[in-house]
Amino acid sequence: MMRETCAAAKVEHAGFHILRHTYGSRLAMAGVPMAVIAEALGHAGERITRKHYAHLAPSYVRDAVRAGLGSLGIFAEQKLKVVA
């Protein structure tokens, strides 16, 4: 069915595995937690999910620390520049 659907859509053939990987990748790039992605993909735990998708995720830890610390009263907020 996938081959027929791809042919009808005039796109290169993509099997179920590549679509599943694309789904996981898109979730990671959207900032969805690894535990949620692991559950959505049916992984037994986060280890394999992190191995394949963590490099695509925005840094949750980095962003949480920056949001929590603010300027620490050292700098005026408007002068802070976040360097990624």
Image (cartoon, rainbow, N blue to C red):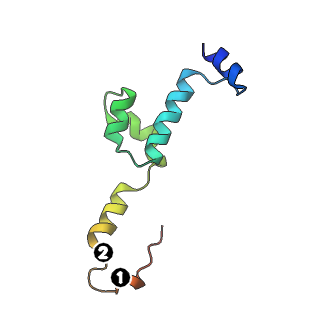
- Which three-letter amino acid code belongs to the residue tagged 2? Gly
Residue at 40 percent across and 56 percent down: it is 59
Labels 1 and 2 touching (C-beta < 8 A): yes
Closest to the observer, 10 or 23: 10
Q: Quadrant location of residue 9?
A: top right
Closest to the observer, 51 or 21: 21
How many labels, in total? 2
Residue 77 got which mark? Answer: 1
For the N terminus, the quadrant is top right
Mark 1 Cα within 10 Å, few/some/many (few <14, many 20+)?
few
Residue 47 got which mark? Answer: none
Task: Give the image location of residue 31, x and y in percent.
Answer: 40, 49
The answer to whether 79 is drawn above or below residue 84 in the figure is below
- Which three-letter amino acid code belongs to the residue tagged 1? Glu
The answer to whether 73 is drawn above or below residue 6 in the figure is below
For mark 2, give the secondary structure: loop
In the image as oriented, which residue stretches furthest toward the front? Answer: 8
For mark 1, give the secondary structure: helix
Residue at 39 percent across and 34 percent down: it is 48
Residue at 64 percent across and 19 percent down: it is 5
Q: CA distance from mark 1 to mark 2?
A: 8 Å
Closest to the observer, 50 or 63: 63
Task: Give the image location of residue 13, x and y in percent.
Answer: 67, 23
Q: Quadrant location of residue 33?
A: top left
Q: Quadrant location of residue 34?
A: top left
> Which residue is the site of mark 2?
70
Residue at 53 percent across and 24 percent down: it is 17
Task: Give the image location of residue 15, x and y in percent.
Answer: 59, 21
Q: Is residue 1 left or right of residue 12?
A: left
First reached walking from the N terminus: tag 1 or tag 2: 2
